[in-house]
Amino acid sequence: MRVPAFADRDWRTGWAFAAPGLLTLAVVMGFPLVYAALISLSSLTLLKPMLQPFVGLKNFATVMADPLFWSALWLTIKYSLVTVLGEFVVGLGIALMLNRTVTMKPVYFAVLTIPMAMSPVSVALIWRMLLQPNLGIANQVMESLGLPRIDWLGNADLALWTMAAIDIWQQTSFVVLILAAGLASLPRDPYEAAEVDGATPLQQFWYITLPMLRPVAAIAVIIQLINEFRTYDLPYILTKGGPGNATEVLSFFAYRRAFLGLSLNEGAAAAFVLLLIVLGLTILFFATLERRR
Amino acid sequence: MQLKCSLKAALLGATLLAAAGSAHAQNVTLRALMEDVPETQIIEKLLPEFEKETGIKIEFEKIGYGDMHDKLVAQLVSPESYYNVLEVDFLWAGEFPTAGWLEDLNPYIAKSGFDLKPFIPSMLELLGQTKDATPILPMYNYSMGLIYRADLLDDAKVKADYKAKTGKELALPKTLAEYVELSKFFKAGGNVVGAAMQAQRGDPNAMEFSNYLFSSGGAYLDAGRKVVLNSPEGLTALKLYADNVQNGAQQGALSATLDDTMRLMCAGKAFSMVTYWWMLPQLDNKEKCPEVAGKLALSVMPGGHGESGGWGWGIPKNTSDESKAAAWKFIEWVQGKKVSIARALEGHAPVRSDVFEDEAVLKKYPFYKTGLDIVASGKSFPIFAYSAQYEDVLGAQLSLAAGGQAKPEDALKAAADGLTQLLAK
């Protein structure tokens, strides 16, 4: 006779252990999420803080009718792809170098994790000072090298990429750590066989390292994509979305709707669109994990 | 005899209750979110005096302007506000009372007999006073004028260069067009930039541009609150603003804030800046800014009108009665004549005419006379429930125009349409 799951002792013990965590998650994540969903379907603003009347998908339609929403979405996609690509390329290079390093490895890792340990707000403030066009160090270095001064954050064509470079500087160490761990776990046998067959280091990298590293690399890329889609701190501190709308990413757009426009309902709708994108990436992340198994 | 005893008992009871209430108020700690500017530091120095007088403790949390609105709103919509005395910008003087977040101060004023007559009427109006309510009591004004390098205007070589290039005598500009022309002249000279500009999108460029608009004879709204921003005067103002950002200001002006312009001016790398009139002593300071100390002067914005703004004190509704009583005690103390004069002697920008006219104040700071002219001639940014959002809408268009990403005509039309839409919201 089959014993019902809830009558099984292990089943009950498992749930007993998981219950506090699940309950905490339900309170700190589930409730705000449901409440935000309700707000996005309501007429609630900061000036009229009442959920009713519910307006269905009107807030989503209003937000999507704004050309700035699409511009923010496009900027977010461009920004996320460029930063993740940059972090991956630089991160992989550093991880490969560290993989070959024998001495002082812990020191290198410790130094590399410093940017990651800093809060994005501190990073933004520090870089804002360094890149200050008239008194900042970056332009003084440029000048001493005989190069022209650059308006890093005030030039509409450059501001987004300056922000992306700062982001890459901070986030690359995370990618390095994941890829370095992946490289350290690769088996030695295929390399020994390749050497016997006369494969060059480049061929070994292309035909052995990259394919075997792919599952780990995919995880790193997807985690970073999710992070980058949610970027808010850097534009808030560095540019306030400007010059013009040159750095107005989707999360900043949602913030402006909610707190400057006092329309929490429209801000919540914009945030939900962002959530859907991040949710899609998360599903992709878990699908990748499953494939790896 | 019995009546006498009863009266005595009642009196004793009332005294005890009052004492208990007062003792309770003394246990209140007032917390205020304050902009990190000299005015806050001036008051902060005087706080031990208030604590000694009343037994009420007060804590200031100082942050940059850009973060204040969001932090305050989060508290004001919560069941109980962490901040129990509020520093409120005039730009929020439409939003906060409309949302019902502030106590009406009239009952407190009436109960304590606080005299409002010395307060400059335009400051009370700027901060949302109506015939029925006073939601915010003025704290200090931040009207804007022109701070400039008087030594450069007096320099014989600069004068000769200017005459050679323009055929005109070098003098303090009387119009906005003259000012922008002078600014471009200085930048072209290569030694200093003509204007340290805070053209970052949002509050910085919206406030700065307002000076250009009023100086050109333009306005946001007419007397009937109809939007008149998109006018020939408005277009002139925006074209001159963009011209100065591109050809007169420092590199990076489009991402610069007040702090950046102050640093630039302090380092002696700019001829002028359009800023708050009371910034003069901060810059004309041998210890902080040796490069420019003794070389600066203040004037009303060329064209005759600058942007006028101000901060005030408010009491949030979502705090306890004890907190509210203690908050009013503080507001009454800090805006009273005695403390206002003590603050003015440290550089406070008064909101009371009796402080502007005080002999000791004028003796220490003769430029307060010009300060009063700036306050008196100042005009206001439109104040309504969505003023903060309008700053952002306007700021984005100004940034596009000044960065060359949009035609001034298109940007001005979009800015005017944005104002019309928000007023109708």
Image (spheres, coloured by chain):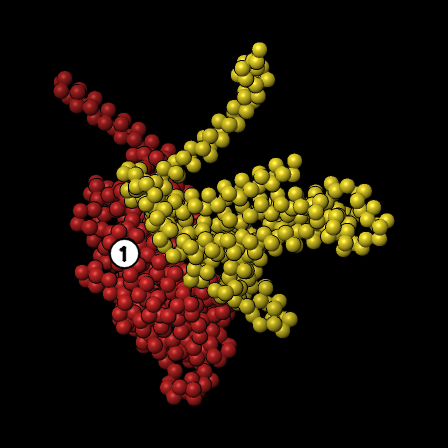
Chain colours: A yellow, B red
Q: Quadrant of the N terminus of chain A?
A: top right
Measured as percent of width and height from the top left, residue B345 is found at 36, 58
Secondary structure state at the residue bearing disc 1: helix
Seen in the image, is A31 located left or right of residue A95?
Answer: left
Seen in the image, is B236 located left or right of residue B256?
Answer: left
Q: Quadrant of residue B8?
A: top left
Q: Nearer the viewer, residue B98 or A54?
A: A54
Give the class, few, some or many, for how many residues have Cα within 10 Å of label 1's Cα (few <14, many ≥20).
few
Kindly identify the amino acid type of the residue bearing the numbered disc 1. Gln
Task: Determine whether B337 is above or below B269 in the image.
Answer: above
Measured as percent of width and height from the top left, residue A29 is found at 46, 34
Q: Nearer the viewer, residue B381 or B59?
A: B381
Which residue: 34% across, 46% down?
Answer: A59
Measured as percent of width and height from the top left, residue A276 is found at 46, 43
Q: Is residue B56 visible?
A: no
Q: Quadrant of residue B75?
A: top left
Q: Is residue B255 visible?
A: yes
Which residue: 36% across, 54% down?
Answer: A66
Q: Nearer the viewer, residue B251 or B307?
A: B251
Q: Nearer the viewer, residue B54 or A205?
A: A205
Which residue: 84% across, 50% down?
Answer: A197
Q: Residue furthest top?
A: A1
Task: Determine whether B311 is above or below B194 in the image.
Answer: above
Q: Which residue is mark 1?
A: B421
Which residue: 46% across, 30% down?
Answer: A26
Q: Quadrant of the C terminus of chain A?
A: top right
Q: Quadrant of residue B300?
A: bottom left
Measured as percent of width and height from the top left, residue A137 is found at 59, 63
